[in-house]
Image: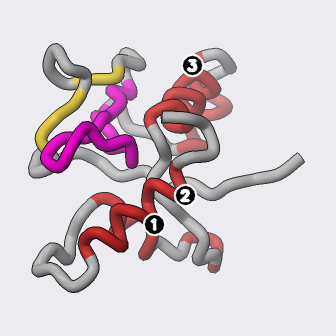
Amino acid sequence: WAIGAGYSNTQAILAASSGTSETDNAAQRAAAYTGGSKTDWFLPSVNELQALYNFVTNTDYSTQAATVNMASAVYWTSTEVGTNNAYNVQFDSGEQYAGSSGSAPKGFDYHVRPVRAFGE
């Protein structure tokens, strides 16, 4: 859940899917992203993605939209809920969802938003 956990969550997901027939999950897509010629992208934790949502909605969105480039869609996080479900964030409402448990089956077709860590 925590801010700062997305990278290690992503690494754990990649390790768990290594050697399996699963070759196209959200963590793999995020880790494979090479935007800006960077290779340290990861799938954010639910709190990291929530912080990004809060940033976008608590500032002048017309200014931030081009920078953040977030569609009003559901985005996967690296915060898992057991083997078959993971948390996600809806980017038009900020809800962490789907379903009453706040998670969705991993097979759902949601968006992936790779992020990178940054320092002070």
Tell me the kind of residue under disc 3: Thr
Q: Which residue is mark 2?
A: 7
Q: Classify 10 Å Cα crowding around label 2: few (below 14), some (14-19), many (20 and above).
A: many
Q: Is residue 64 magenta?
A: no
The image's mark for residue 11 is 1
In the picture as drawn, the residue positioned furthest to the bottom comes out as 19
Whether residue 6 is situated above or below residue 63 in the rendered picture: below
In the picture as drawn, the residue positioned furthest to the right comes out as 120
Helix, strand or loop status at disc 2 = helix
Whether residue 5 is situated above or below residue 55 in the rendered picture: below
**Dot 2 and dot 1 residues touching (CB under 8 Å):** yes
Q: Magenta residues, as a range?
A: 73-91
Q: Is residue 67 left or right of residue 13?
A: right
Q: Position of residue 5 (x, y in %)?
A: 56, 47
Residue at horizontal 17 percent and vertical 49 percent from the top? 83
Helix, strand or loop status at disc 3 = helix
Residue at horizontal 76 percent and vertical 53 percent from the top? 118
Magenta stretch, main secondary structure, is strand
Q: Residues under labels 1 and 3: Cα distance?
A: 29 Å
The image's mark for residue 57 is 3
Tell me the kind of residue under disc 2: Tyr
